[in-house]
Image: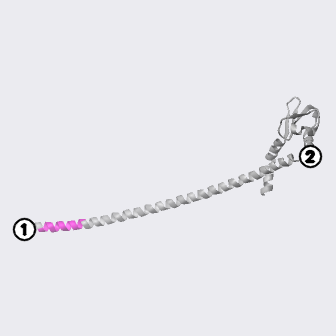
Amino acid sequence: MEGSGVGKIIEEINKGTAQKVSEIEAGSANKVNFIMKHFEQLAEENAEKIRKQGDDEISVIKRQIISNAEIEAKDKIDKEKFNWVENVFEETRQVILNLSAQEKKEILEKMCDISDKENFVFYVDKKYANLLGNAGNVKEADINDFGVIIKSKDERVTIDNTLTNRLAILKQHKRYDIAKILFG
């Protein structure tokens, strides 16, 4: 039967099948290569995007770190400047508190020097009351500060001329001037 027509047909079918299988395998290999190249290209593009995003994020983080460091340094400098200005007022307090009794007396007398004295009472801390003597309108009080609190006899007017209050007022009005002197 080998020489018969059926054998030749089978042989032709096997030959045709082998050829088709080869063609399919070659076409499949080409398609697989095309798909692999396409995926490799997509992977490379995505990797490049990811690298760029990473670089952008690193750049942003770097700028944030630098900005935060600059802000922190400025805050520290401002706090230090604030402390220096505060020290000026504290040193002023100490200079006044370390004055001689005569100098303190002169300051207290100036603080009590107002017109219409007879309508006011002058309250001085017990520690400093002896500097003003026994004037009738000077009273000892526990104000725990150097200076004078002046009250009208009808108690409608009160003037706080204590060192703490006077320095607080000076701080409000002179802080900028002192900072300018210290830091230019």
Looking at the image, which residue is at 62% across and 55% down? 68
Return the x and y of residue 56 as percentages of the image width and height: 53, 60
Give the quadrant of residue 113.
top right
Q: Helix, strand, or loop for circle 1?
A: helix
Q: Main secondary structure of the magenta part?
A: helix
Residue situated in front as seen by the camera: 100 or 9: 100
Image check: 114 left or right of 145?
Answer: right
Region in magenta: 11-24
In the rendering, which numbered label is found on residue 65? Answer: none
Where is residue 22? Give x, y as percent: 22, 68
C-alpha distance separating marks 1 and 2: 142 Å
Q: What residue sits 82% from the left and 50% below the top?
A: 91
User: Which numbered disc flags the more N-terminal residue, 1 or 2?
Assistant: 1
- Say if the magenta span includes residue 19: yes
**Magenta-colored stretch includes residue 124:** no
- Pointer 1 local density, CA inside 10 Å: few below 14, some 14–19, many at least 20: few
**Residue in front for this viewpoint, 49 or 61:** 61
Write the residue at 49% across / 61% down: 52
Q: Amino acid at mark 1?
A: Gly
Residue 113 visible: no
Residues at circles 1 and 2 in contact by the CB criterion of under 8 Å: no
Residue highlighted by disc 1: 5
Can you say whether 6 is above or below 85 in the image? below
| Residue neighbourhood size for the residue with mark 2, other residues' Cα within 10 Å, grouped as few (<14), some (14–19), many (≥20) | some
Give the label, 1 or 2, closer to the camera. 2
Does residue 39 appear left or right of residue 150 in this picture?
left
- Residue visible at 60% across and 57% down in the picture: 65
Element class at badge 2: helix
Query: Residue 110: horizontal and vertical position, in percent?
Result: 92, 42
The residue identified by callout 2 is: 103
